[in-house]
Amino acid sequence: EIVMTQSPATLSLSPGERATLSCRASQSVRNNLAWYQQKNGQAPRLLISGASTRATGIPDRFSGTGAGTEFTLTISSLQSDDFAVYYCQQYNKWPQITFGQGTRLEIK
Amino acid sequence: QVQLQESGPGLVKPSETLSLTCSVSYYSITSDYYWAWIRQPPGKGLEWLGSVYQTGSTYYNPSLQSRVSMSIDTSRDQFSLYLSSVTAADTAVYYCAPHYDFWTGSYFEHWGQGILVTVSS
């Protein structure tokens, strides 16, 4: 099983600041990585697929980078609506799909 | 765009079988998608349970393979999840979601709203 490890578990920042979230895979997943945002009581929302391709309607302040085992989700200037939990997911090893444990982005 | 709606009992007794159905609207279940179940225990992360294709082929999370099964009813645009011998650890919000194959990308762009299933006597 490919284990996805996200860091930090919690990130406390202020609106307007830059957020950097990390996701590490236990083995290479090439660029087969997605990022999701989840708010309380809602289903996850796809932000990024293919490690760096924004999903439809996702603002350009969200960007994804990385390949292999190290990935980063960057939010360039935090808005109040961005405070949520973020998950990464690998889909390189079908039929195994695994998620990271999540990073909670909270208002400082 | 595709819409999904989970349905089923919100309360299941320990040792029984959890059964959920996902109804698909505004999209053909015989399209290119695979149809997946994902769960999320309260306050915890996401876990892929498995996927079913229009042909009936199934792919399960190895950690649950002995207890999970899925089926698809193309005539009703529905697919189902069955999880046997449930315990309190199976209490979770269960989501259904489609995804493409490995070559296109097995990520989840559309999600159902989720259904909370509690395992308790």
Image: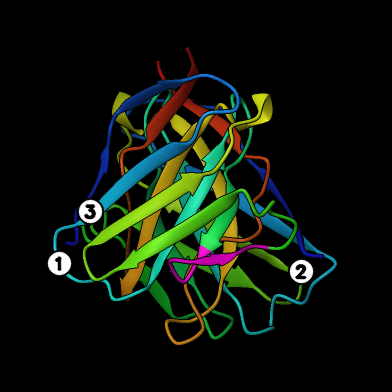
| Residue B73, placed above or below residue A47 | below
Residues indicated by labels 1 and 2 sit on the same polypeptide chain: no
Magenta span: A49-55
Residues indicated by labels 1 and 3 sit on the same polypeptide chain: yes
User: Can the viewer see residue A95 in this picture?
Assistant: no
| Residue farthest along the right direction in this orientation | B26
x, y percent for residue A26: 14, 59
Q: Nearer the viewer, mark 1 or mark 2?
A: 1
Residues indicated by labels 3 and 2 sit on the same polypeptide chain: no
Residue underneath mark 1: A27
Q: Are marks 1 and 3 in contact (CB under 8 Å)?
A: no
Residue type indicated by callout 3: Arg
Question: What distance separates the C-alpha of mark 1 from that of mark 3?
Answer: 9 Å
Residue type indicated by callout 2: Arg
Question: What distance separates the C-alpha of mark 1 from that of mark 2?
Answer: 40 Å
The quarter of the image holding the N terminus of chain A is bottom left
In front of the other: A90 or A105:
A105
Residue underneath mark 2: B76
| Residue A29, placed above or below residue B97 | below
| Residue A84, placed above or below residue A22 | above
Residue type indicated by callout 1: Gln
Q: Secondary structure at mark 3?
A: strand
Residue underneath mark 3: A24
Would you say residue A62 sits in the magenta stretch?
Answer: no
Question: What distance separates the C-alpha of mark 3 from that of mark 2?
Answer: 40 Å
Q: Chain of mark 1?
A: A
